[in-house]
Image (spheres, rainbow, N blue to C red):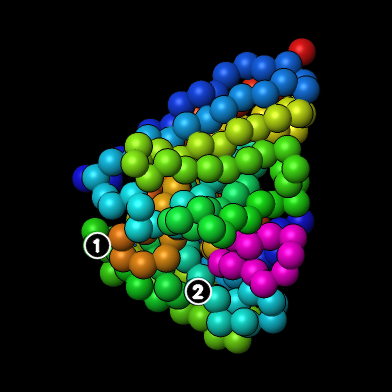
Amino acid sequence: QVQLVESGGGLVKPGGSLRLSCAASGFRFSDYYMTWIRQAPGKGLEWISYISPSSSTIYYADSVRGRFTVSRDNAKTSLYLQINSLRADDTAVYYCAIDGSGPNGGYWGQGTLVTVSS
Amino acid sequence: QSVLTQPPSVSGAPGQRVTISCTGSSSNIGAHYDVHWYQQLPGTVPKRLIYGNNNRPSGVPDRFSGSKSGTSASLVITGLQAEDEGDYYCQSYDSSLSAYVIFGGGTKLTVL
């Protein structure tokens, strides 16, 4: 079965950095578009980044462009999100997800919590 | 403010039918991008209910249906059940430079 397992979250000071990872299994990872989505406490869903199977196409939300970098390693079936210059409003649960298109898409991991506080 | 507009809340009694709207524009839903719908029950991870405007993944009850017309989409839930209470989000794509994947602000469904 499809599994997405995020890791790397934690408590970090403003201005700090983290690298989030998402280990994928149960599907042909190299065939799928992947996304990172976050949800601040008590708030709605906010899309952050999108990466194509070959990494040739990458998009970012305005709110994170220039501070966040998405990457993937198809050999390791893993997705990554390097997050720099963290701010208090980056505090959220970060989810990796298979893009919602198609019958085999739309799966989400359990999320990893990033808390930015001094 | 979300690019896709959803009502903040809807409600209905058990057994009733409710509709959640999702209004976009010519750069997203109206540009023929697909709409997907997600359900987030309290304390859980979002789950995809509808993909490609009107397709249900296996395991999703046929009480849930989706449609799209022009710059808007709708999620209809029939035979409302207490366990349907939660938040519902529409998602699409946008051709503008500021975002590619876009979500609605979410709709809180209350089962009376």
The answer to whether residue A104 is left or right of residue A100 is: left
To which chain does the residue with label 1 belong? B
| Relative depth, front residue between B94 and B1 | B94
Residue B103 magenta: yes
- Above or below for A27 versus B45: below
Q: Which residue is mark 1?
A: B58
Instruction: Residue at 47% x, 43% y: name it.
Output: A72
Which corner quadrant of the image does residue A6 belong to? Answer: top left
Residue B100 in the image, given as x and y percentages of width and height = 63, 62
Amino acid type at image mark 2: Asp
Residue A76 magenta: no
The answer to whether residue A107 is left or right of residue A10 is: left
In front of the other: label 1 or label 2? Answer: 2
| Highlighted magenta segment, given as a residue range | B92-104
Residue pushed farthest top?
A: A118
- Above or below for B59 versus A94: below
To which chain does the residue with label 2 belong? B
Our reading of the magenta stretch's main secondary structure is loop
Instruction: Residue at 74% x, 65% y: name it.
Output: B97
Label 2 SS: loop
- Above or below for A11 versus A20: above
Instruction: Residue at 35% x, 37% y: name it.
Output: A76
Q: Which residue is mark 2?
A: B34
Label 1 SS: loop
The answer to whether residue A43 is left or right of residue B85 is: right
Residue B51 in the image, given as x and y percentages of width and height = 41, 68
Residue A28 in the image, given as x and y percentages of width and height = 28, 52
Amino acid type at image mark 1: Ser
Disc 1 or 2, which lies upstream in sequence?
2
Task: Look at the image and tell me whether residue A43 can be seen.
Answer: yes
Instruction: Say which quadrant the C terminus of chain A sits in.
Output: top right
